Amino acid sequence: MPDESFRTNVPEVDPTEIEDSRTAIADEHHSFLEKVMVQSGFADLYDARDFSEVVFRVMRDLMTTDTIDRVEAELHTEAIPTDEKALQFEVADLWKDTNPIVKFLSRIRQPLTGPAPLGIDSDLFLRRVANEGGLPGTVEVEQAVKAVFSATKDQLSQERIQEIAGLLPDRIRELWEQP
């Protein structure tokens, strides 16, 4: 029966007296994926990785090839220190498109700026990220995007941060400019 207690000899623990080592680490010492996971509310690093790739894909759609290359050149830090092979990569690897056809097309087409349907406005940006990112119901799309933005800005120069801000649609730019 669910109401029965089978282990009565377990001592009761006050949760306020337990030190959680995860909260003791200052935010600036978290790796890229840890920041995204913690700030967005994702359950694990894999969700943070997959969602970051989607946000980066939509961001790249707004940029020229030169801007894409400049951003990639600055993202050469480890995404997370780990022995787990599936998570051993640089943030620049997340930035690159893994689909060869999409990668090729993004190199030859013009940036998709301006209002939808020809361009990507704030609503389309968030809709694409939510649909392609497979967000769980517990994670808000704007908070998750803001988490990716925050972790990304930690990797970029002020010049690159300003360049990207100038390319983002209004509401997305506001998310980008928040700390």
Image (cartoon, helix red, strand yellow):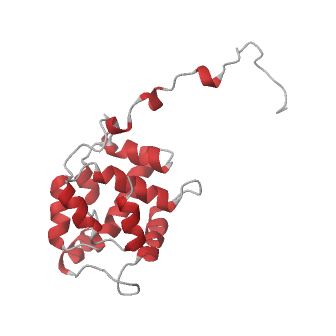
How far from the left and from the top, in percent, is residue 60?
28, 69
Residue found 24% across the figure and 63% down from its top: 162
Quadrant position of residue 68: bottom left
Q: In this view of the protein, can residue 75 be seen by the observer?
A: yes
Q: Is 153 left, or right, of 121 in this rendering? A: left
Query: Residue at (29%, 53%) from the top-left corner?
Result: 153
Residue 84 lies in quadrant = top left
Say if 53 sits above or below 107 in the image: above
Residue 11 sits above or below residue 42 on the image: above
Does 178 sit above or below residue 34?
A: below
Closer to us: 172 or 1 = 172
Residue 96 visible at all:
no
Please, is residue 128 above or below residue 42 in the view?
Answer: below
Where in the figure is residue 93, as x and y percent of width and height? Answer: 24, 54
Q: In the drawing, does residue 47 fall left or right of residue 61?
A: right
Residue found 22% across the figure and 82% down from its top: 110
Q: Residue at x 31, y 80 (%)?
A: 113
For this view, does 46 lie left or right of residue 139? Answer: left
Give coordinates of residue 106: x percent, y percent.
Answer: 23, 75
